Image (cartoon, grey):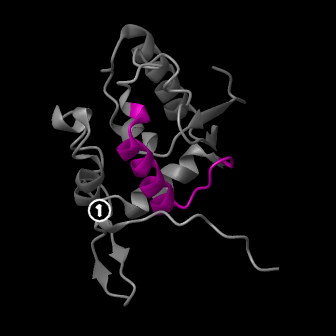
Amino acid sequence: MSLNMTIGLRPHHFLCLPGYKGYNYNQAQVNSWDKISKQLKENPDTDILILSGKDDLCKKCPNDGKGTAVCRDNSVNELDKKVQFLIGVETGKKYKFSEIMKRMQWVMTPEVHEGLCSGCSWWQKGLCHDTFSTENKTPFLSVTSNGKIGKIDPSTLTYVPPTKKAA
């Protein structure tokens, strides 16, 4: 992969990439995930284009085009919207991967991660429970609307598209 390339990713894959351990649906897709995760680890300032739906990690999915494809499920689209809202990124815009991961560190706790991902088959297999562990990290905090420290309940999040900034 080229150092100057842009990788297209859907928002919920920012939950998956940090905990990726080399398991996937088939070898072609494993190779795709391996290459992209290696690129991002070695070059954290890689440009990321935020996409809705199929992205560069999904290109080799054996379920692509089938009616049973999990990524076509509305719950995955809703998960994308929740993550997009949590980290404040917009579809169609480019960001540095390192910037997105800093945003993830600000909002993700093990509890929020579980709340977002507990329905995922990879979560249910136990492959990513420790991805956002607070061990070796500064504790994560969130601020409620009244200014008190609190936890984010991901089930109550709704995505509100960004509006144009006032002139």
Residue furthest toward the left?
Answer: 125
Does 92 lie within the magenta span?
A: yes
- The amino acid type of the residue labelled 1 equals Ser
Residue furthest toward the right?
Answer: 167
Does 126 lie within the magenta span?
A: no
Q: Is residue 66 something one can see in this rendering? A: yes
Q: Which quadrant of the view contains residue 71?
A: top left
x 44%, y 54%: residue:
83
Q: Which quadrant of the view contains residue 63?
A: top left
Q: Nearer the viewer, residue 3 or 76?
A: 76
x 53%, y 51%: residue:
100
Q: Which quadrant of the view contains residue 112?
A: bottom left
* On screen, residue 128 above or below 4: below
Label 1: few (<14), some (14–19) or many (≥20) C-alpha neighbours in 10 Å: few
x 53%, y 66%: residue:
160
For this view, does 110 lie left or right of residue 48? left
Main SS category, magenta section: helix
Question: Which quadrant would the N terminus be assigned to in this image?
Answer: top right
Residue furthest toward the front?
Answer: 67
Residue 38 percent across, percent down from the top left: 49, 25
* On screen, residue 32 above or below 52: above
The span shown in magenta is: 71-94
Residue 8 percent across, percent down from the top left: 61, 34
Q: Which residue is mark 1?
A: 155
Residue 144 percent across, percent down from the top left: 36, 81
Number of on-image labels: 1
Residue 152 percent across, percent down from the top left: 31, 69
For this view, does 115 lie left or right of residue 77? left
Q: Is residue 134 something one can see in this rendering? A: no
Q: Nearer the viewer, residue 65 or 126?
A: 65
* On screen, residue 52 above or below 108: above
